[in-house]
Amino acid sequence: MTDLAPPTDGPRADGDASLSDQLVQLVRVMHVLKAQMTGTAGQGPDERERAAHVLLFPLTRLGPLRQGALAELVHADPSTVSRHVTLLVERGLVRRVADEQDGRASRLVVTPDGEREVQKMRQERDGLIAQATTGWSPDELATFTRQLHRFVRDLTDHVSQLGAAAGGAVHPPEKDR
């Protein structure tokens, strides 16, 4: 087992603890935002639909994928992804096509309606970020973006190393959600 305990004293320990606290706060804020954007605070139909819509991002970016590969990519339980995909198909946002290499299998493809939904979600997200950072200079925004990118990349690499050390399957987290 890997020891994840950070140093317990010194300036680095204070910085790690502060970052950890801010990340916890960020997760809480993201949950509140999701509830506000879906108009529900629970697991109502709107929130489930929004959760399903998140699957459109990797399908749009990577092209047709098998459902199992999509579940692995987004680190989700295959049964959950199955329910979400069913909803996306029913809504006409995704369709199943025969796998060219294995006709018994199918791949998921985003429909034009699904592409419009992805664009709408991106615009909502971009608008929210623009509003939240309205007082930031272009340099501040660029610096924050670079540092956040570095943090996400390093954390992703570390998680992958932990998974490899534990003998588990390693898949980087979905980056465009």
Image (tube, rainbow, N blue to C red):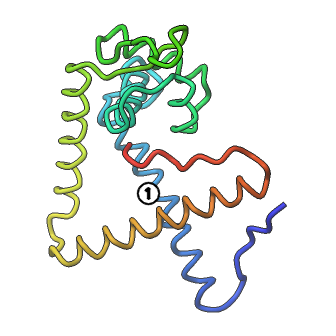
Q: Would residue 140 be found to the left or right of residue 61 on screen?
A: left
Residues 65 and 31: in front is 65
Q: Would residue 98 be found to the left or right of residue 72 on screen?
A: left
The residue where tag 1 is placed is: 26
Dot 1, how many residues are within 10 Å of its Cα: few (below 14), some (14-19), or many (20+)? few
* Residue at (29, 76) in percent of width and height: 143
- Answer above or below: position of 142 versus 104: below
Give the percent coordinates (x, y) of residue 85: 45, 18
- Answer above or below: position of 117 versus 125: above
Q: Secondary structure at mark 1?
A: helix
Q: How many numbered callouts? A: 1
Give the percent coordinates (x, y) of residue 57: 35, 36
Q: Looking at the rendering, which quadrant does residue 9 occupy?
A: bottom right
Q: Would residue 176 be found to the left or right of residue 111 on screen?
A: right
Give the percent coordinates (x, y) of residue 99: 46, 16
Q: Looking at the rendering, which quadrant does residue 54 occupy?
A: top left
Residues 72 and 148: in front is 72
What amino acid type is highlighted by mark number 1?
Leu
* Residue at (63, 58) in percent of width and height: 159
Q: Would residue 84 be found to the left or right of residue 13 on screen?
A: left
Classify the position of the N terminus by image quarter: bottom right
Classify the position of the C terminus by image quarter: top left
* Residue at (31, 28) in percent of width and height: 39
Q: Looking at the rendering, which quadrant does residue 55 occupy?
A: top left
Q: Residue furthest front?
A: 101
* Residue at (33, 38) in percent of width and height: 61
Q: Residue furthest right?
A: 1
- Answer above or below: position of 19 versus 48: below
Give the percent coordinates (x, y) of residue 167: 79, 49
- Answer above or below: position of 71 versus 138: above
